[in-house]
Amino acid sequence: SSSSQLTSPSPWSPGKWKLTLDFGVDEPKPDSSSLEQNENRIQLDKLLGDNWGAEGGRLVLPFEVIISSETSSTDKNGRGQANPSVEMTWLGGKPTGSIQCIPKETNDDESDDEQIHHATYINNKGEQRVQISPGLWRNEPPTPILPSFTKILSGQASSLRMYLKLVNSIERNTISIPEDQLLLLKSNTFRTTQYASGIQTVLPYQYAKEQSQQALEEQLNHETGDRRLDGSDLLETAAAYKDIAALVMERDERRRRWKEVEGVLPKISGPSIKIGRAATTEELLNDVKRWGIWPGDTELMTVERGVVLAAVSAKQKKQSIFPWMQDTNSEEMVVVGKWSATPLFDE
């Protein structure tokens, strides 16, 4: 049966997922704000060292988890938490459940005294094992994108936040994460009906953006474009430039409007015309690699690719003349990679 028909037996049923943490620095995208990325680079240099993630270094860590609606058992793992409020501040409210990593099977005979581990990766010293402490998660319902919208958009994403702790340090090429590192994860999530509505909401924005770009390119095309741009008649050429300026403004405005909403609506790749067909929306909803059981609702959920941040204590403690004014809570957040989640179903 297709997953748009699949639901979970109860809104509190636990779900099994495979999480993949992909540590590294992304190259700036052409139309993204490079300011944010530059600021993060400065943070990385300051908190994790100048060379962190250089030369395209990456470290990929896949592991399996159980997502449940229980929150009591994990509250007590105060292991090494100098300041537990970092986690709670990150969640931004009451946790709605916990995330427990599933231990990996060991095929060694002498595995009795082996430490439990949840993930492995390979570096130049061979296979490394990683233990991951459980954490909590919260799925926050959408809120309006102020100031442009006073109501939430139809099919707007919920935002998932969770945290985990890497017990061991990890290292591969230019990527290194110290032991007992708190990792903060966030991403957009959609239940099936939310997603179907979200696609319908984002399409007109995406379409308008694509069309205005196309109109501009057609006008500028050397073979088939605006002949007045050849420059034989000065007034004509001036008029043509004015038209092009108008097309550029139109394109920028439509891109700006799209940019404003695309962060909270389903990510669609490929031309919007194709995705607008009902069949394609149906295909997206039937893509079993996306939809899994996540507590909170009987409808299945999809988790879009998200961001991994590390909470790092600022090395340069701000010195103050008055000792009581010392900044004690000096955890800083820095983006260290991205993450994705794929649902797992027991065969």
Image: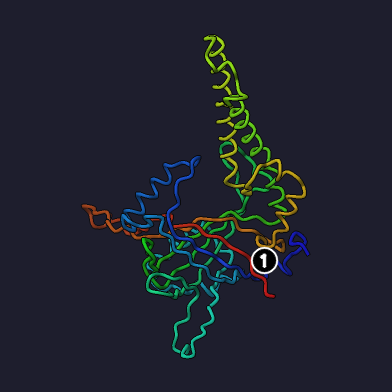
Residue at (36%, 52%) from the top-left corner? Answer: 43
Q: Is residue 257 above or below residue 51?
A: above
**Residue highlighted by disc 1:** 293
**Image spot of residue 324 (x, y percent):** 26, 57
**Image spot of residue 130 (x, y percent):** 45, 74
**Image spot of residue 160 (x, y percent):** 57, 58
Q: Give the residue type that dot 1 points to.
A: Ile
Residue extending farthest to the left is 321
Residue extending farthest to the front is 223
Q: Is residue 177 above or below residue 234?
A: below
Q: Nearer the viewer, residue 213 or 11?
A: 213
* Left or right relative to 257: residue 9: right
Crowding at mark 1 (Cα within 10 Å: few <14, some 14-19, many 20+): many
Q: Quadrant of the C terminus?
A: bottom right
Q: Nearer the viewer, residue 120 or 141?
A: 120
Q: Quadrant of the N terminus?
A: bottom right
Q: Is residue 259 above or below residue 249?
A: below
**Quarter-of-image position of residue 325:** bottom left
Residue at (35%, 57%) from the top-left corner? Answer: 52
**Image spot of residue 115 (x, y percent):** 44, 82
Q: Which color mode does the image show?
A: rainbow
* Left or right relative to 318: residue 145: right
**Quarter-of-image position of residue 165:** bottom left
Question: Count the marks: how many?
Answer: 1
Q: Secondary structure at mark 1?
A: loop
Residue at (60%, 42%) from the top-left corner? Answer: 261
Q: Nearer the viewer, residue 40 or 12?
A: 40
* Left or right relative to 298: residue 130: left
Q: Nearer the viewer, residue 132 or 161?
A: 132
